Amino acid sequence: MSKELPAGAGWETRVTAVVVLLAMAALAGCQTNPPLQNATGVSSMEVDPSRKGPVSGVGVEGHDIVSMADQMMRDILAEPIFADTGKRPRVVIDAQYFVNESSQAINKNMITERLRVNLNRAARSRMSFISDQSTAMVERERALKRSGTTDVGTRGLTKAVAGVDFRLTGKITSHDSRNVRSGLVQRHTQITFELIDVETREIIWSNFYDVARAAADDVVYR
């Protein structure tokens, strides 16, 4: 890369030559050491939540939750007690009494919230939904109205907050087996749903959803 300069060259010429040589060396270095690229990476992709995705195993997947919530919604609405009679039974659907005893980590809120939203959209005047998780917030707002800190709003005051007729409970269980020779894993997951009459403890509706799969599973559920 070095080059001899004429003996009579001035200092300006020598400085210019050094700068040129350094620039050439830097350019050569860039050519021999290209920027690192994620050659083994996979570009992000859009996934239909109602269909099996590219990463799947033997457990409950996102598309199972979509299908399960839709199936449970239709079954609940078919119950005669939820016929459009104008009474609008009050229901709580949340994950507070939804128990996960399976070997898989599952966000129970994804199940109960999707079921509640689907029912709320489809039921219309056939049932009303009570937010038990909002009790503290509601009590605070009621206290502000009654103390005169705020006005009573546009709907006036009620003697008490709305009571509940039915509440969702549920349980997730699973049974796993493994072939030690082939490494094949099989899992049967069962999700049970029940609506309980909170006055009498009567089970007014129940159903379950099954997921059974086998694979040489290497998917980690989080």
Image (tube, rainbow, N blue to C red):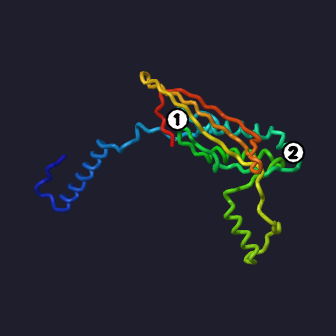
Element under label 1?
Answer: loop
Q: Is residue 104 left or right of residue 84?
A: left
Q: Nearer the viewer, residue 207 or 86?
A: 207
x and y, in percent, of residue 54 in the image? 54, 34
Q: Earlier in the sequence, mark 1 or mark 2?
A: 1
Q: Is residue 124 left or right of residue 182?
A: right
x and y, in percent, of residue 48 in the image? 62, 38
Q: Nearer the viewer, residue 153 or 101?
A: 101
Residue drawn 57% across the image and 30% down it: 188
Per the model, the C-alpha gap separating discs 1 and 2 is: 42 Å
Q: Residue furthest top?
A: 181
Indicate which label's residue lies in the foreground, 1 or 2.
2
User: Mark 2 belongs to which amino acid?
Assistant: Asp
Mark 2 is surrounded, within 10 Å at the Cα level, by few (under 14), some (14 to 19) or many (20 or more) other residues, namely some
x and y, in percent, of residue 190 in the image? 62, 34
Position above or below: 214 against 125: above
Residue drawn 59% across the image and 29% down it: 212
Element under label 2?
Answer: loop
Residue drawn 62% across the image and 41% down it: 171
Asked if residue 9 can be seen in this view, the reply is yes
Q: Is residue 4 left or right of residue 25?
A: left
Q: Residue furthest left?
A: 7
Residue drawn 14% across the image and 50% down it: 4
| Label placed on residue 55 | 1
| Label placed on residue 187 | none
x and y, in percent, of residue 198 in the image? 74, 50
Residue where numbered disc 2 is placed: 84
Q: Residue furthest right?
A: 85
User: Mark 1 belongs to which amino acid?
Assistant: Val
Q: Nearer the viewer, residue 209 or 118?
A: 209
Image quadrant in which you'd find residue 51: top right
